[in-house]
């Protein structure tokens, strides 16, 4: 009897202990999960994203191996967020993206990452983009990603998946009216408009730099600078001049006349035109020299001023005494 009781009591002891352990585990875990309100999760997520500005977003984790040096910086695995329910975390991401407190950006090692945005900047974003639809924001984002290269309307159709040209056109018009984007023309594509953010300037490769105005070559500017450069080389006929010398000379002489400052590359193009016209020659082999240091000098004026036609036999004298036969023979060659 006693042994049975002892046995029974011995068997009964682990049971309450085990029940207490299991019961203790469950409430503790439940307390950790339910101990976070939506507001507290928002604040915790903002704090974490501020500390780690290139975290991988949770929706990109499926089927994707996190970058090696960011393994502990993902929203799914970081110790700071260990006790937060994933549903609450995902809802917080959506909430903060909607309030512009977080933005999604391309991660340098693949996938997308969450970027922290301060309350002040977020308020500016809300004021700036308030009232825009998802498609309008998508078009703006694609133009923003193009930076100073700009995009054509057809590029926006391909990148956004909005195939209706009227919809794209209406969105572009609205963004232009809101002064979020602006149009420009490229020297390579004529009058066809491209679009860029309103606070950016298109690359010189597309606009042609200072030589072009509204997509058209500024002939007066080119002619004025051409004459100035030629005058400098005439004045320095013996010692020659560098590209940098030409740039400085035009800058001083054109003050109040030209409304732009030519870059070194643009002056090099100008000097190249003088070389092509047979007025200048390089002073040395400057293949490896930086553009500003390349020196040129004026070529001596040609001794003969006649045109090519004047070298044709009998073209500048009367045909007489068999001259016509000589001309016929020359033309038959």
Image: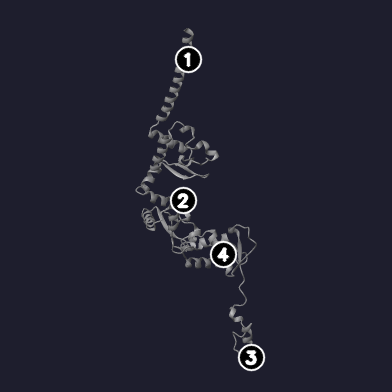
Instruction: Give the tally of numbered discs.
Output: 4
Cα–Cα gap, marks 2 and 3: 76 Å
Question: Is label 1 or label 4 in front?
Answer: 1
Task: Return the residue nearer the eye: 298 or 263.
Answer: 263
First along the sequence among labels 1 and 2 = 1
First along the sequence among labels 3 and 4 = 4
Question: Is label 3 or label 4 in front?
Answer: 3
Cα–Cα gap, marks 4 and 2: 36 Å
Split into 4 quadrants, where in the image is the C terminus? Answer: bottom right
Q: Does residue 269 appear in this view?
A: yes
Residue 14, x across and y down, in percent: 47, 17
Residue 264, x across and y down, in percent: 54, 59
Q: Are marks 1 and 2 in contact (CB under 8 Å)?
A: no
Task: Return the residue nearer the eye: 184 or 60.
Answer: 60
State the residue position of label 4.
Answer: 271
Residue 24 shown left or right of residue 281 in the figure:
left
Q: Which label sits on residue 145?
A: 2
SS for tag 3?
Answer: loop
Residue 102 sits in quarter: top left
State the residue position of label 1.
Answer: 11
Q: Which label sits on residue 123?
A: none
Q: Are marks 1 and 3 in contact (CB under 8 Å)?
A: no
Rendered view: 27 above or below 261: above
State the residue position of label 3.
Answer: 322
Residue 299 sits in quarter: bottom right
Task: Return the residue nearer the eye: 69 or 280.
Answer: 69
Q: Are marks 4 and 2 in contact (CB under 8 Å)?
A: no
Cα–Cα gap, marks 1 and 2: 69 Å
Tell me the colour scheme of the image: one colour
Cα–Cα gap, marks 1 and 3: 140 Å
For disc 4, the neighbor class at 10 Å (few under 14, some 14 to 19, many from 20) is many
First along the sequence among labels 1 and 3 = 1
């Amino acid at each position: 009897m006693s042994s049975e009781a002892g046995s029974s009591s011995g068997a009964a002891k682990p049971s309450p202990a085990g029940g207490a352990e299991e019961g203790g585990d469950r409430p503790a875990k439940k307390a950790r999960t339910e101990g976070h309100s939506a507001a507290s999760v928002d604040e915790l997520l903002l704090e974490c994203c501020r500390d780690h500005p290139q975290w991988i977003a949770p929706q990109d984790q499926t089927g994707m191996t996190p970058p090696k040096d960011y393994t502990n910086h993902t929203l799914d695995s970081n110790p700071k967020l260990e006790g937060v329910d994933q549903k609450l975390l995902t809802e917080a991401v959506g909430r903060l993206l909607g309030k512009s407190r977080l933005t999604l950006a391309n991660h340098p090692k693949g996938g997308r990452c969450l970027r922290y945005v301060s309350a002040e900047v977020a308020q500016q974003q809300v004021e700036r983009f308030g009232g825009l639809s998802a498609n309008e924001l998508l078009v703006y984002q694609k133009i923003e990603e193009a930076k100073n290269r700009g995009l054509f309307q057809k590029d926006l159709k391909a990148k956004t998946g909005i195939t209706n040209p009227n919809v794209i056109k209406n969105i572009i018009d609205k963004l232009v009216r809101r002064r979020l984007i602006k149009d420009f023309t490229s020297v390579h594509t004529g009058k066809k408009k491209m679009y860029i953010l309103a606070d950016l300037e298109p690359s010189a490769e597309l606009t042609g730099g200072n030589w072009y105005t509204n997509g058209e070559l500024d002939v007066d500017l080119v002619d004025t600078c051409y004459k100035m450069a030629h005058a400098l080389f005439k004045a320095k006929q013996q010692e020659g001049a560098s590209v940098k010398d030409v740039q400085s000379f035009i800058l001083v002489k054109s003050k109040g006349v030209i409304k732009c400052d030519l870059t070194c590359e643009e002056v090099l193009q100008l000097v190249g035109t003088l070389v092509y016209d047979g007025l200048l020659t390089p002073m040395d082999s400057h293949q490896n020299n930086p553009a500003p240091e390349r020196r040129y000098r004026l070529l001596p004026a040609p001794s003969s001023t006649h045109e090519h036609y004047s070298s044709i036999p009998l073209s500048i004298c009367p045909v007489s005494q068999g001259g016509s036969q000589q001309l016929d023979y020359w033309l038959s060659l």
